[in-house]
Image (cartoon, coloured by chain):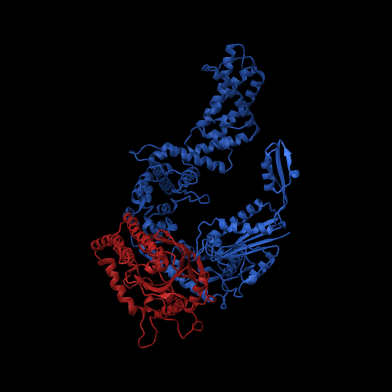
Chain colours: A red, B blue
């Protein structure tokens, strides 16, 4: 498995090799064939919307994991209840394979659910959501396997599991305990589905590029490859070979300075500019990932870079929490 | 007699914590009951993926009644003080006792009902439970390993009512998450509880789950003419992940069988928790056993097929590493070790390999190895750390080095050393015995020990983050099991760079101390160990031989008698030495009394025999030589008065005793022997 750089959730669900299993038999499905990639998303949207989640759009800054969306990292802090679900394209520059590896991608998609406070029936809700996308817990061996989650770059950790379906990891399930180095209360529960893995499983195909993106067989049908293969090819070259390390390094330092600067400024209602500052933390962490993919981070520097991003994130977390506690 | 049943039902408890949790529950309950003066006949606990269960049999209905004595004011104290005491105790003046001029109240305390005490004890156990890692959830403050959902607490058929935050105790529990669909069930006794669990597809007892897994797995394998590769640690873990174990035999794509078996087994075990399956010849068979947590309508076919495809993807990853790694030679990987820090103050892994290489060349002659071969093996011994496979499976370090070395045509003894220089890795692991492996293994461990001692990172108490005790024990076992003749100080000196502070005395002492601990653990007499170590010998093989002979000698009555004679002699000498230095003159033979002459003769006869035996390191012969002194010494003490009025006689007799002490002291420090 690739060691995913910098900002990440548990690497196994993000950067690891996807594997496939036979599709559920058609009678398990609520409609004729297995769900397409986008149908899985739509089904999950409908399901989680019915659970009171606000359905958000992907965050428009490059991130390595759905957790880093401010709807998770920042909203996990403070006293307010919050339920959200969204898809997050997640960029892992080091995992690029030029579109030549059927199981490894430099960008893949996470379906992210955050429930705060975590409800007592959260595991049941999760299992129901699997049934909605065609995975029946009575026919498959669904297992909650210990996996403590930690993200040192955002000073976050939680306890939970990786969820296995017939031996394949399909989700990460976590009860946050700290974010930005701060204890969280009430506690947010987070579920992260690896969408490509789920789709490979549900559709029973061997290559991610062969996945049916929308309804297969029709005149408008597209495969995952038709949608994303060119993206993989070009960005792999950019991220692994072409990106200008000197520029990345300079931009990293600019972002670092911007965070401090923004947190020292106030908006018209007197608040610190936490959300813009946090955007710059995300940019800094992605720049770090890019430098890492270019092989420009020496082993000895690595911890220092991660520590720098963590400090920036902590500063944002503290400012956000102050704002939340003040009822902002 | 009332029975207590307590079940703590939660979301999935990590498998590795379950056995400890069962022990902690038993301990906390036992302590709590004792503190509440509640006796019981039997206490048992169980742990599984979603529940901890406690059963206590034979509790009393209530605590025994007690009398509480409370000290009051002095008898001559003002009335107001006495009245206050009466108010506090609720007694009449006539009920007070007088003892030594003080009022005492003796208040009967009827025992409280057991149920009331359990209602306090159970929440206390939950709140104090020592999980290795615990968490909060939802809006609560209660900590548990994962969210806690139900507390079943029943005493003698009745619910013991209490609540912890939002959780209210009850007589309800749940069965298997998927198969136990009948919903929550009620249980008012352990018998009922056990029956309901079985009906709801839960095996409560971890040992029973393990037995089921093993039995079913072996049966599945036997049907295919293959056998399960037993893995006790994996069995423990898997039994902690399932409530209704259902082993399934899956097929592995045979094309992967050309991967090293360690790679296949590690992939199965560490990623997927599968058991490997072997043919009668011992080679891996193209199957695996996974343990599902449920029965399905299709007999597990879909689950087994799904697992098989996951395994193929995992093994494809392993094959990718295997193919990629072999594109670069081990030698060419040395540069990559520049980028790996061994320890902030001890440089990079590359620097460490350089040191091990020099050291292995120096040690080689001691191990009977060719210095160049040992140095070459040492040079490659950490190269596999930069391979993809070891990056993925750190536990395969060394093992992969050996495979890659053989693949590139490195000689077998050198390739073996890449694997075996990490050994022994524990008490059950053999020390290497091939000369090149021995040289590299010693060099590896000594570099670690000398390095960390030089920067002051020595173990303290239970803290030994760099596993220096294990490294020291490794050095000891390699030396002893291969009978290497070398002084410890010479070895540590070889590992110490010339410009470094020769701080190796601490290290030599540390290693000798580990040897003492090892010997004591083997059951060797403490006093014999002390007697031998007092010699200051650094040759571990000689220490062991000497100790073996001494232990055998002390085990027979003659040896014990000789020790008594030795002690008598040395006490007399010590008493005389307090008065002033003894004459250094050698004893001379005196004809009278005969016993004095006899001892002189015995010493004269023994001396050369003893020296020859010691020279030959034949410690059994040395002990036999000493044994020949026993009778003359006993007779001497019986017949001869050492403290003669005649100063010349006295001096000569003392000199004889000093002769005995010196002779015996050449073998061991007998003053350390008990008795």
The C terminus of chain A: image quadrant: bottom left
Does residue A117 appear in the picture of this structure? yes
- Name the spot of residue B157 as percent of width and height, x first: 70, 65
- Name the spot of residue B243 as percent of width and height, x first: 58, 67
Does residue A167 appear in the picture of this structure? no
Q: Residue furthest right?
A: B94
- Name the spot of residue A117 as percent of width and height, x first: 47, 68
Q: Residue furthest bottom?
A: A219
Q: Nearer the viewer, residue B424 or A63?
A: A63
Q: Nearer the viewer, residue B619 or B33?
A: B33
**Quick check: B75 left or right of A239?**
right
Residue A15: quarter of image = bottom left
- Name the spot of residue B343 as percent of width and height, x first: 37, 49
Residue B550: quarter of image = top right
Q: Residue furthest top?
A: B646
The residue at 71%/53% (across/down) is B111
Q: Nearer the viewer, residue B527 or B277?
A: B527
- In the rendered view, would you say B355 is above or below A314? above
**Quick check: A32 left or right of B49?**
left
Residue B197: quarter of image = bottom right
How many numbered dots are placed on residues in this image?
0
- In the rendered view, would you say B11 is above or below B542? below
The N terminus of chain A: image quadrant: bottom left
């Amino acid at each position: 498995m690739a060691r995913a750089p910098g900002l990440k959730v548990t690497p196994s669900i993000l950067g690891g090799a996807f594997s496939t299993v036979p599709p559920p038999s058609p009678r398990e499905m609520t409609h004729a064939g297995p769900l397409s990639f986008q149908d899985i998303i739509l089904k999950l949207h409908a399901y989680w919307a019915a659970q009171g989640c606000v359905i958000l759009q992907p965050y428009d800054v490059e991130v390595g994991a759905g957790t880093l969306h401010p709807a998770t990292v920042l909203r996990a802090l403070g006293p307010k209840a919050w339920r959200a679900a969204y898809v997050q394209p997640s960029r892992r520059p080091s995992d690029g394979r030029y579109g030549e590896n059927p199981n490894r991608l430099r960008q893949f998609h996470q379906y992210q659910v955050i429930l705060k406070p975590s409800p007592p029936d959260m595991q049941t809700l999760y299992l129901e959501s699997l049934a909605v996308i065609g995975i029946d817990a009575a026919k498959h061996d669904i297992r909650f396997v210990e996996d403590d989650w930690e993200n040192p770059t955002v000073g976050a950790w939680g306890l939970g599991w990786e969820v296995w379906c017939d031996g394949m990891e399909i989700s990460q399930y976590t009860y946050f305990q700290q974010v930005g180095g701060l204890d969280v209360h009430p506690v947010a529960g987070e579920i992260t589905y690896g969408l490509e893995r789920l789709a490979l499983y549900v559709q029973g195909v061997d290559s991610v590029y062969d996945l049916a993106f929308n309804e297969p067989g029709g005149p408008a049908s597209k495969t995952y490859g038709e949608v994303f293969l060119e993206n993989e090819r070009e960005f792999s070259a950019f991220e692994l070979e072409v990106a200008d390390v000197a520029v990345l390094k300079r931009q990293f330092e600019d972002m670092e300075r911007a965070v401090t600067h923004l947190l020292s400024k106030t908006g018209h209602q007197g608040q610190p500019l936490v959300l813009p500052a946090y955007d710059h933390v995300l940019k800094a962490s992605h720049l770090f990932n890019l430098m890492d993919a270019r092989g420009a981070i020496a082993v000895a520097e690595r911890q220092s870079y991660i520590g720098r991003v963590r400090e920036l994130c902590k500063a944002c977390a503290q400012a956000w929490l102050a704002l939340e506690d003040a009822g902002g | 007699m009332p029975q207590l049943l307590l079940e703590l039902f939660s979301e999935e408890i990590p498998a590795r914590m379950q056995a400890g949790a069962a022990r902690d529950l038993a301990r906390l309950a036992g302590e709590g009951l004792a503190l509440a003066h509640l006796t019981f006949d039997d206490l048992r606990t169980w742990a599984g993926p979603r529940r901890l269960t406690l059963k206590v049999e034979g509790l009393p209905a209530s605590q025994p009644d007690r009398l509480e004595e409370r000290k009051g004011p002095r008898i001559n104290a003002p009335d107001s003080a006495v009245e206050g005491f009466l108010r506090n105790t609720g007694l009449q003046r006539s009920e007070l006792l007088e003892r030594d001029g003080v009022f005492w109240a003796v208040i009967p305390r009827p025992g409280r009902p057991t149920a009331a005490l359990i209602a306090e004890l159970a929440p206390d156990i939950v709140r104090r439970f020592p999980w290795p890692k615990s968490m909060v959830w939802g809006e609560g403050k209660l900590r548990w390993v994962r969210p806690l959902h139900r507390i079943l607490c029943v005493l003698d058929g009745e619910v013991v009512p209490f609540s912890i935050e939002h959780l209210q105790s009850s007589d309800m529990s749940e069965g298997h998450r998927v198969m136990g669909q009948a919903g929550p069930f009620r249980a008012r006794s352990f018998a009922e509880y056990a029956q309901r669990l079985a009906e709801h597809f839960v095996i409560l007892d971890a040992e029973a789950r393990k037995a089921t897994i093993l039995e079913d797995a072996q049966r599945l394998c036997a049907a295919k003419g293959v056998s399960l590769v037993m893995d006790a640690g994996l069995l423990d873990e898997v039994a902690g992940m399932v409530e209704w174990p259902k082993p399934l035999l899956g097929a592995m794509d045979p094309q992967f069988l050309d991967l090293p078996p360690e790679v296949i087994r590690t992939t199965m075990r560490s990623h997927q928790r599968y058991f490997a399956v072997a043919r009668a010849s011992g080679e891996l068979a193209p199957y695996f056993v996974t343990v599902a947590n449920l029965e399905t309508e299709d007999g597990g076919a879909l689950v087994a097929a799904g697992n098989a495809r996951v395994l193929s993807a995992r093994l494809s990853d392993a094959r990718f590493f295997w193919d990629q790694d072999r594109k670069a030679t081990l030698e060419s990987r040395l540069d990559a070790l520049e980028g790996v820090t061994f320890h902030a103050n001890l440089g990079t892994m590359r620097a460490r390999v350089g040191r091990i290489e020099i050291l292995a060349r120096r040690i080689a002659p001691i191990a009977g190895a060719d210095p160049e071969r040992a140095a070459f093996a040492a040079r490659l011994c950490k190269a596999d750390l930069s391979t993809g496979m070891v990056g993925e499976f750190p536990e395969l370090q060394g093992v992969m080095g050996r495979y890659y070395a053989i693949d590139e045509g490195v000689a077998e003894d050198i390739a073996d050393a890449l694997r075996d220089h990490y050994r022994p890795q524990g008490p059950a692991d053999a020390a290497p015995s091939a000369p090149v492996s021995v040289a590299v293994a010693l060099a590896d461990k000594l570099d670690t020990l000398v390095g960390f001692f030089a920067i002051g990172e020595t173990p303290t108490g239970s803290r030994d983050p760099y596993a220096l005790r294990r490294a020291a024990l490794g050095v000891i076992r390699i030396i002893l099991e291969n009978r290497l003749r070398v002084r410890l100080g010479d070895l540590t000196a070889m590992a110490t760079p010339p410009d470094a502070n020769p701080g190796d005395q601490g290290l030599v002492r540390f290693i000798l101390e580990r040897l003492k601990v090892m010997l004591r653990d083997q059951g060797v007499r403490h006093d014999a160990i002390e007697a031998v170590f007092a010699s200051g010998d650094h040759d571990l093989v000689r220490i062991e031989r000497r100790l073996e002979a001494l232990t055998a000698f002390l085990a027979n009555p003659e040896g014990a008698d000789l020790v008594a004679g030795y002690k008598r002699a040395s006490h007399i000498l010590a008493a005389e030495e307090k008065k002033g230095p003894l004459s250094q003159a050698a004893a001379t033979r005196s004809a009278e009394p005969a016993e004095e002459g006899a001892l002189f003769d015995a010493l004269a006869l023994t001396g050369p025999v003893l020296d020859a035996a010691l020279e030959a390191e034949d410690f059994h012969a040395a002990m036999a030589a000493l044994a020949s002194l026993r009778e003359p010494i006993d007779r001497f003490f019986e017949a001869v008065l050492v403290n003669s009025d005649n100063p010349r006689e006295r001096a000569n007799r003392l000199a004889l005793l000093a002769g005995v002490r010196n002779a015996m002291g050449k073998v061991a420090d007998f003053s350390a022997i008990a008795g």
